[in-house]
Image (cartoon, grey):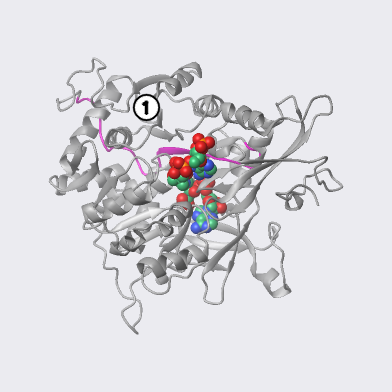
Amino acid sequence: MTTPGWAAHLPRPAGGDAGASPVPPAPPGDTLPAAWAARFEAAPDRPVLWEERRGWIRAGDLDRASRRVAGRLAAAGLGPGDRILMSAATSVELVEAHVGALRLGLVVVPANTAYREREIAHVVGDCNPRAAVVDDAERAGWIRRAGADVLVVGPDVDGARDGGGGGRGGPGPRSAALDAAAPGDPALIGYTSGTTGTPKGAVLSHANLLASSESVRLAWRWTADDRLVLALPLFHIHGLGVGLHGTLLAGASAVLLPRFDPGAVLDATAAHGATLFFGVPTMYARLADSPGLAGLGRLRLCVSGSAPLPPAVFERLAAGSGQRVLERYGMTETGMNVSNPYDGERRPGTVGFPLPGVELRLARARGTGGVPPTTAARAARVGEIELRGPNVFGGYWGRPEETAAAFTADGWFRTGDIGEHDAAGYLRLVGRARELIITGGLNVYPREVEDVLREHPAVADVAVAGVPDAEWGEVVTAWVVPARSTAPPADAELLGFAAERLARFKCPRRVVVVDALPRNALGKVLRHELRPGGSD
Ligand code: MLC
Ligand code: AMP
């Protein structure tokens, strides 16, 4: 059975049937850059982005800066379809670079600023970007060594002195055709790991990005009057595809914070009259502990995603601020899929109903992903979530076999997440078919961490899994069998070894030394038998 569920997202006048959408129609344009350009042109004087250093930037300013960026990129020899890697902390300049690149038809490849050399080299080697925009000289060196040109260490493409004519504010080269990409053209490659632990590039088209932004614009009643406090990084789909893209599509505005801090979020909310906040559950857990929690109640809407929001955190936020956080479900490969309703009950522990345009079904045949089917009735309800819709990506960059494996024969995307519907039809995520750890809203594949730790001479065998944690959701933990020939490795030594090779968030927080790993008859590690205190 498939669940369209869109009606759940329409407004519900008291006691009445679902009514028409109160959100004004989308701007003209069948790609995001075209729709954004229409917004910029229609209201050039509207404030669109704020950051501490530059204050408010108006839509007309962003329009001009992104045109100049596109001109500079074109002058540097880049053209539609070329990949451009972007790895920088949040700033207005990064947004200008991103918007300019998309307007030129380039394919943006965002990369986490925490990546170490081997992680960034993998991305560069895989999608072969023609250029990179980074904000760190060491990372720039790694990117060059991996074979890509670093256009700007900045990330101020507009202000960069590249000999392309015209500094910031100047006219810039004008030859590039803007906003000419077709809906089916690739727009973004988001790297996400598979069960093998090797990150793959999910290729999202302009149509995919637009569909994902449009569905949440409608469902969350996002209008030009809204102002988002954006403290999520702009190198993952949550901050970029939801926060930034949605703001520009709605013709709304965003207050950019370079990093998350509960006090800074609450101060920005009050100082700028913000109406929206989007965050991962770790952010909400920290907000719930904040002395200023009541200030969250000023916002029209708070949305949580990327990892499960514990119902206890939901209740503490509601009790302390009156804010009933709306939880939704998304993925790099699909953008946003399922959301609790804006009107009607926001049910903790669930992600709600498919967003407008998204179809969802539960595939029971592929099992429950290790979720114990406590009763026969439950076993019949639980299954892998499969999705179809204009938001769903076309495939992984250069990986036809993995692309084919990700889709069913009849064209549905297999998410690897296990879900069930509750009695009222709300979707609950109950497990994962993939061996995935989510810590602080970031994904870690055990295999990638195991492969690194196994390179250490004092490690004979290793298994990595997530251990539940109130703040982080899960913390990465390693169970290590020491090599016989050497002394057991000190925790600090192993963690340092990992930190040289992996982004900090992937490094184990804890190391448990064991004599042997629990394995089944086929030799596969039984991860659910790994215990934080060692073997029983
Ligand atoms: C930082 N650290 C983490 C971590 N983030 N460790 C584990 N998991 C994480 N997510 C490390 C730091 O490097 C540091 O290590 C130590 O933890 C303490 O740092 P901190 O200052 O407390 O962390 P902070 O910088 O405040 O970051 C926490 C955070 C951040 C929650 C604000 O992780 C964050 O912005 N998360 C959101 C990520 C995101 O955008 N996810 C969306 C993916 S898209 P040390 O050793 O140096 O002390 C997606 C699809 C969808 O999932 O549906 O949205
Ligand atoms: P990513 O591959 O980084 O895009 O992460 C996507 C994954 O995050 C999904 O497949 C889910 O496992 C997880 N996820 C996203 N939103 C939620 C949520 N609200 N609750 C639980 N898991 C979520």
Residue 57 percent coordinates (x, y) = 19, 41
Residue nearest the observer in this picture, 151 or 81: 151
Reply yes or no: does residue 180 show up in magenta: yes
**Range drawn in magenta:** 174-197
* Residue 464 belongs to the span the image colors magenta: no
Identify the image quadrant of residue 295. Answer: bottom left
Instruction: Give the residue drawn at x 53%, y 24%.
Output: 117
Which one is in front, 38 or 347?
Answer: 347
Q: Quadrant of the N terminus?
A: bottom right
> Could you tell whether 317 is left or right of 507 in the image?
left
Residue 264 position (above or below residue 375)? above
| Helix, strand or loop for the magenta stretch, by majority | loop
Disc 1 designates what residue? 135
Q: Is residue 175 left or right of residue 376?
A: left
Q: Which element carries disc 1, helix, strand or loop?
A: loop
Quadrant in the picture for residue 419:
bottom right
Location of residue 246 in the rendering, given as x and y in whole percent from the top left corner: 32, 51
